[in-house]
Amino acid sequence: MVKEIKLSNCIISENTYPFIIAEIGNNHNGDMAIAKKLIDEAEKCNASAVKFQTKDIETAFPQELLNKNYEGPNSFGKTYREHKQVLELSLDNLAELKKYSEDKNLIFFSTPFDIKSLESLAKLDMEIYKISSFHVTDLKLVEAIAKKKKPVIMSTGMSTIEEIDAAVKILNNYNCKYLIMHCVSSYPANPKDLNLRAINVLRDRYNCLVGYSGHETSPNIAPSVVLYNACAIERHFTLDRAMKGPDHALSLEPTGMDVLVKRSKTLFDAKGKEEKSVQESELKARKKFRGY
């Protein structure tokens, strides 16, 4: 088992505070000022990392979907293509945001949705890569990411064990250090569907580090995964859940992210070890009430 993943400013392991990813994704709405403000707020919340998404629109989506009418309250264009084009940041934009993040001691990375985007992102020399739940079964993309010889985080929403097996086999073939995220791909996710005990199933089956990527609206559930020895937590992050755009409503605002980070650290401190012993803080009461 890979017991830890070392990054430039932190170690991801079961023995350290959880690695908290503020998933900005598309919540910048194509606006660099909003993107930087989100990074500022992630720093204030003491998140460990910020993550974006990168897509070559014509490659990542079927032409039929791109040509469809997409007018509505959360649309930025008349067609799905126009909508996605507005939300996409250029490689120069991402390079600027990477430096902006790293100047604030935040890990920066972006999820590639296709091989063309992966090759563009490789020019940024990111420390870690993400395989989204959407792409667990895109084995060509999984292999292309594995070939980069960087640590990998892979979410597992809407995936069967057999589908995860196939992706993990590729990661193992390339001797990747990886962390698997339990995830439920419903937007937003009902707490009754979260099945957090699957975290233990994933750890036992793949003998690897495990985390949690959540889409529930509450900030109060995710911190509890620390008690299952989850070492990373990812949540969508926004300035305002009422903003126009597809992911804002299921995201955490800065106040929610602040709660998540603080509670995760508190629960990590409270978790302790799998043993029963007298704590040093108990000795005074033991002496007073038992005389020894």
Image (cartoon, rainbow, N blue to C red):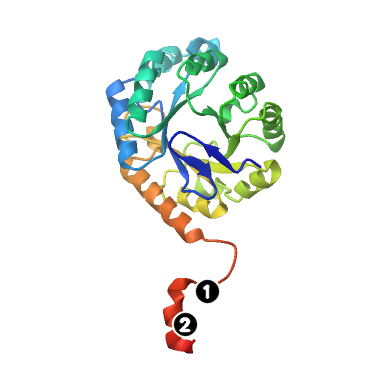
Residue 141 placed where, x, y %?
61, 20
The residue shown at (36%, 17%) is: 93
Q: Nearer the viewer, residue 143 or 198?
A: 143
Residue type for callout 2: Arg
Location of residue 115 by image quarter: top right
Q: Is residue 246 left or right of residue 14?
A: left
What's the CA distance linking mark 2 and mark 1? 9 Å
Q: Nearer the viewer, residue 243 or 252?
A: 252
Q: Is residue 266 left or right of residue 128?
A: left
Residue at numbered disc 1:
278
Q: Is residue 170 left or right of residue 81?
A: right
Residue type for callout 1: Val
Most extreme residue toward the bottom, as rendered?
291
Residue 272 placed where, x, y %?
52, 61
Q: Is residue 20 left or right of residue 182?
A: left
Res. 78 in view: no
Residue at numbered disc 2:
286
- The answer to whether marks 2 and 1 mark residues whose Cβ atoms lie closer than 8 Å is yes
